[in-house]
Image (cartoon, rainbow, N blue to C red):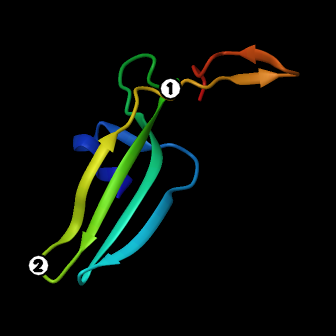
Amino acid sequence: MPAALQNDEYEPAPGEVTKYIRWHYGTRWTHGNFVARRIRSGCFSFLPAPRTLFFFELMHSPDFTGVFTCTPLDEPVTEGYSILGCPYLMGYLS
C-alpha cells in the first residue's frame, strides 16, 4: 500500500506499520499509520528526505476493496537524533 502514496511522490521509510482492524456492519476497516519519505531527484537525490507520518484507511466490503484514504498528518517528522544526550541533526538525516 505505501508504494502508491500520493501519486508516487513518496517511498516507504524504514519502520513498522501500525494498524488496527475492526468490523462494522459487514465491512472490515483497517486503520493505521506509517512513515514515508518524498522521492528525490537531481544531484542531491542520494541524501535521505525528511520523513512524513501518514494515516491510512483500507476498506473491505462486498462493494469495494481498497484504499479509502491516505493522508499526511504532518510535514515532516522533525524529531532529531541525540548523541550522549546532545541534539544532533534535528531530523535532517532521518
Cα separation, mark 2 vs mark 1, equals 43 Å
Up the image or down, 64 lies above or below 69; here it is: below
Q: Which residue is mark 1?
A: 46
Q: Residue at x 22, y 59 (%)?
A: 68
For badge 1, the amino acid type reads Phe
**Above or below for 62 versus 85:** below
Question: What residue do we see at 77% from left, 22% from top?
Answer: 82
Q: Which residue is mark 2?
A: 63
Quadrant in which the N terminus is drawn: bottom left
Q: Going by the image, does 82 lie left or right of 24?
A: right
Q: Few, some or many C-alpha atoms within 10 Å of disc 1 (few <14, some 14-19, many ≥20)?
A: few
Q: Residue at x 24, y 60 (%)?
A: 67
Q: Amino acid at mark 2?
A: Asp
Q: Which mark is residue 22?
A: none
- The quarter of the image holding the C terminus is top right
**Residue at image coords 55%, 24%:** 78
Q: Say whether residue 74 is left or right of residue 81.
A: left
What is the x, y in percent for residue 36? 44, 41
